[in-house]
Amino acid sequence: MASPLVERPDLPAYMTWEQLEQLPDEVARQIELWDGRVMWVRRGPAEHQEFTNLIWSGLRRCARNDMAGDPQHCWRVHTETNIFFGRAGKSDFVTPDFLVQRCLPEPYQDVRADDVLLAGEVLSPSNSQTDIDEKKAKYAKAGIPWYWEVTLAREKSAIAMIRAFALETSHGPLPEGVHPLYPANYLLTGKWTPKDSDAISTEFPFPIHIPWSELEF
């Protein structure tokens, strides 16, 4: 989000959505609630916003092309929109940088994880691996079938790599007494860099073809 950061007030470790709504907007928009736990969200540099918008534009174009070819398909592509987990309540949510969802029957409805096809994050150099892994685990636990990571270059204003992950809900054999930490996880199914490809190209969750020329800052 492009708005400037404000000083973080002293807040409790856990809050409800209703309590979050009472905060000033410039504070509330910096917070996600993970099962009610207050998680401060780092806002990236201008490049973060620009590349988020470029990814959104490419995905939106591809979604529209798919819908034009099959009227039964209806997708919406958004940036920085809350995904609420569970079928009720709003005190467990994250705000991905971009997402693709099924069209909802009515306007202005909350986006629930069941409605999301793809969630994506644009990773700035300041993002920690722990933060990335924990947020990815929440997407997987919620059953979101596709997850994208967009990694920004460190030395210039450019995308260094885009990786696509597919949801895996089973696991291979493990030694007796050993259990996976998470019941679902993501498997890497696609990786693109400007050096080894002309475009981001995949058939899932619908045909996507985004030339790198569309993703230049």
Image (cartoon, helix red, strand yellow):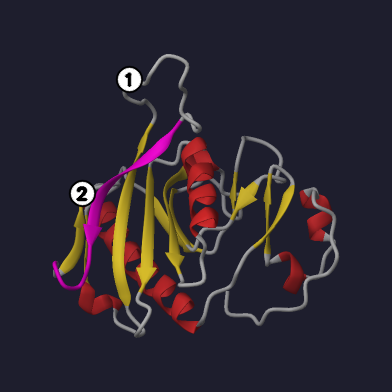
Q: Position of residue 25 (x, y in %)?
A: 75, 70
Label 2 secondary element: loop
- Per the image, the residue denoted by label 2 is 203
Answer whether residue 3 is magenta in the image. Answer: no
The residue sitting at 50% across, 32% down in the picture is 181
| Depicted 51 relative to depicted 162: above or below | below
- Three-letter amino acid code at disc 1? Pro
Where residue 58 appears, x then y in whole percent? 31, 68
Membership of 194 in magenta stretch:
yes
Q: Which residues are magenta?
A: 184-196
Q: Quadrant of the N terminus?
A: bottom right
Residue 79, how many percent across, how many down? 49, 65
Residues 94 and 185: in front is 185
- The amino acid type of the residue labelled 2 equals Glu
Looking at this rendering, what residue extends furthest in the top direction? Answer: 176
- Specify whether 49 is left or right of 71: right
